[in-house]
Image (cartoon, rainbow, N blue to C red):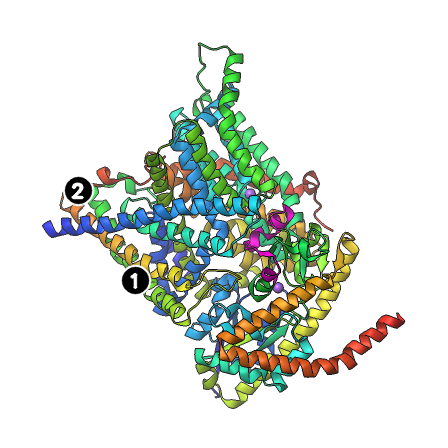
Amino acid sequence: MGWIIKLDEGLGWLSKVCGWIACVAMILMAANVFYDVVARYAFNDVSIAMQEMEWHLYSVVFLLGIPYALRTDGHVRVDVFYTNWSNTRKAWVNLVGALIFVIPFAFLIGFYGYEFALDSYHMGESSGDPGGLPNRWIIKAVIPFTAVFIATAGLNMATYAIRVLAGDRSYETEHSGGGLA
Amino acid sequence: MIGMIMFAAALVMLMLGFPVAFTFGGVALFFGVFAQGMDLFAFMPYRIMSVMQNTVLMAVPLFIFMGVVLQRTKLAEQLLTSMGRLFGGLPGGLAISTILVGALLAASTGVVGASVVAMGLISLPVMLAHKYDKRLSTGTICASGTLGQIVPPSIILIILGDVLGLPVGDLFKAAVWPGVVLIGLYIVYILVLTRLKPETAPPMPEDPTRSRKQEIVAALIAIIPPLALIVVVLGSIFTGIATPTESSALGGVGAVVLAIIYRQFSFKMVWEAAKDTVSVTAMVFAILIGATAFSMVFSYTGGDYLLEEWLTMLPGEHWGFIILAMLVILILGFFIDFVEISFIIVPILAPVAESLGINMLWFAILVAMNLQTSFLTPPFGFSLFYLKGVAPPEVRTVDIYRGIIPFIAIQILVLALIVVFPEWFGMSATY
Amino acid sequence: AQETFTLRLAETWGPNFPIFGDTTKRFKETVEKMSDGRIRIRIDSANKHKAPLGVFDMVKAGQYDMGHSASYYWKGKVPETLFFTSMPFGMNAIEQYAWFYYGGGMELMEEVYEPHNLLSFPGGNTGVQMGGWFRKEIKSLDDLKGLKMRIPGFAGEVFAEVGVNPTNIAPGELYTALERNTIDAVEWVGPALDLRLGFQQIADYYYTGWHEPATELQFLVNKKVWEKLPADLQEIMRVAMRSSAYDMLIQSQHANAEAWANIKKDYPNVKIKKFPKEIFQAMYEANKKLLKEAAENSEMAAKIIESQRNYLQKSRAYTDISERAYLNTMAEVE
Ligand code: NA
Ligand code: NA
């Protein structure tokens, strides 16, 4: 059991790092878009590279946010029955779901996403627009990169469920899903 | 046929309470690998990439950020409660304020995920704190957050313009009246409901230390800053300073500036707001990615051909065609998303409509109105999921499902009005 | 029974996209009839594969057997693919087809696509594309300085050289952006397709084209798939691609003529303009400079540019005394 706890906490830490990167990207993106508007309107200055940077940052926000939201239980559930279930039952749903849904899904995206990014790297792909960003493979590589972390977050979901089954944790304490409003 | 079985399977699996996004993705994976093999999923990186490059969707994180900052700095609460106070002893004032704010947001974006989530963050806590009925609150928010689809600028209208070959400007103009009528009827509904059941939306408590006049003045003053922010967002679009998407960044930065003015600013606040934004954004996009896997499997296993076949059996006579076409879109809207409908169904219906001498502009508005409803219909209405994602745990999915029903009824009513009395909306049914 | 083949074709366009989409449909019909059903074509539009600009990769990787797109979209991946669509101040449609089929163009295209396990064939021509919709009249080079214009690709680079600010706007927001002066000008295709986006409602100045005098789409075929086809079916494919491409050129002419007549009738505000000579001269020089840079960066590019330049010179001399002379004569007598 000890190693499960260690693994659980280690995996949780990984997801939080993803969230941290996504938060930085979020703030940079807002600043980036704001800057582009001001530059265009006030100084009549347009940079395609800066415009492309917007969607690069936005992609990082939502992609790396996914493993983070898995750890914080931020992904929406249909709770018609779920809320009334016992911790044990919830743990089984999450354990099985993580193993048969999250991890295989992440695996397929990671596997094909890797080829997708690698091909771009081999071709030296860049933006086709005047003054656009080079090295398109970097942003494409965020797809398999994210998939790896979705898989670890899925594994994390499983380790957490095991801790709940062992009576070491419960979903009430951790449940921050929908805790925003 | 696999596509149809997959819908049923997804429906059952969703009820188990596993996160919606991964239920879609997981079910799609099983059916996809079973029917076509693993290689079908080689399309997924392209589909994810197309979401990444869809810059219109950047409005989602940016508007959410604005909503979170307004919420954390209590400015949203101030806006809504002050507006509510303006309505004085009138019950339902907060709900009406919510609809009006939703209408303003709708005029600045056409991305439903952005406005539903922002409205959920801004007004759900306030309504709940003032003892509003959960169903009324969530129904109001989903419905007014979805207005962005019909109130221009609107993504549905742009897509329909493309599919039907109609100028976008004409569509935008034609959609204004239906949008206004819809907003008006939402408000009428709130007024009627609170007359019949005042306990669902209690009026704002009166402040005994102030006269009514003082109260109104205080409320007007309190409304100004957050309203100014909305005006900046809208104004930047109308004056062309920013595109609708970019305006959402002005909203986010503007909210931070307001926070500074009101001495609510701290780096910690911004960081926490960013964290909330990332989490909610990820929730929205994970659903989009799960759903794109789902629709990928649906169409690559022949689901789209099956739909096409069914549609060729629609009657070829004016009223029969219109009514059945609307029913088909409404029913499909329960299950598949509006982009798929626009691209798969509308091109099949369009030539038939044209051959019947139906005015395509009118037809497009009908379809748009109908597709807007698809965001709200349980079980797969995305607006409902999005709101659930930001609602406190005591708001159950069932509350949202039930709360939206009256608003769906209103939408169908408006749709029927446009069908029967197109001239009321400045259109004609035929050329 | 003879072996039958089902080829999956991914097109960059949406379903029922006029002209471009008609071309793939005609191709499909022709192939299926000519082969008596031994080849079936299944067309997937952009709404299905969701990767309008992923056609190259998907055909290369074998996820699709064929594609219908445009060569210059792959410029970011393989810079030399740029030259097989249309070049600023380059050949017109007839001249370019002559170059492809009799002037060595096909061989050069094969050389560029071969390393990527792809074959490329001409896939239909739009004819001269219009120079774009402008909200203000452009009278001098100064009017272009700082002008914000949606103009992608190589033409965007040429415009950038003369002071324009090429700007990215999501297609869904183009209309609103132009309407509200977020941008000042938009380049799209030609009357038939521009009409659908409604630019004539919000911009008065429609400039004649120079940057894409003969935009050629392309059929992409996965080479391994091609090699599996028996020789007779390969020939059927070849003929079907060539005839549907030709069909697209004349359909474009027809649809543009109709659309232009409608614009003239319904939108008397629209005025046709030509850039002043100083602008054309500046852009001509800018274009030469960019081509020179491209030639320095890649031997293959140098070879293509050289071939196109020589062919243009030779065939233009004849165009001058045939087409041009005829049009000039007509202009005089009418
Ligand atoms: Na809107
Ligand atoms: Na063009």
Say above or below: C42 vs A82. below
Asked whether disc 1 touches disc 2, contact meaning CB atoms under 8 Å apart, the reply is no
Q: Where's residue A94, x and y in %?
A: 25, 49
Q: How many marks?
A: 2
Please identify the quadrant where the N terminus of chain B is shown. Answer: bottom left
Residue ID at (39%, 64%)? A137
Residue C198 among those drawn in magenta: no
Q: Residue furthest right?
A: C333
Provide the residue span drawn in magenta: C159-183
Using the image as rendered, state which of residue B138 and residue C242 is in the foreground: C242
Residue sitting nearer the eye, C174 or C308: C308
Few, some or many C-alpha atoms within 10 Å of disc 2 (few <14, some 14-19, many ≥20)?
A: some
Label 2: which residue?
A169
Q: Amino acid at mark 2?
A: Arg
Work out which residue is located at the far left of the displayed protein and give it: A2
User: Who's the residue at 40% across and 32% down the image?
Assistant: B71
**Image side of residue B271 versus residue A14, left or right:** right
**Ligand 1 within 8 Å of the CB at mark 2:** no
Around disc 1, counting alpha carbons within 10 Å, would you say few (fewer than 14), some (14 to 19), or many (20 or more)?
some
Residue C58 in which image quadrant:
bottom left
Residue B392 visible here: no
* Residue under pointer 1: A107
- Report whether B70 appears left or right of B184: left
Question: Mark on residue B229?
Answer: none
Find residue B220 and report its horizontal and vertical position in percent.
53, 21
* Callout 1 amino acid: Phe
**Percent x, y of residue B34:** 34, 66
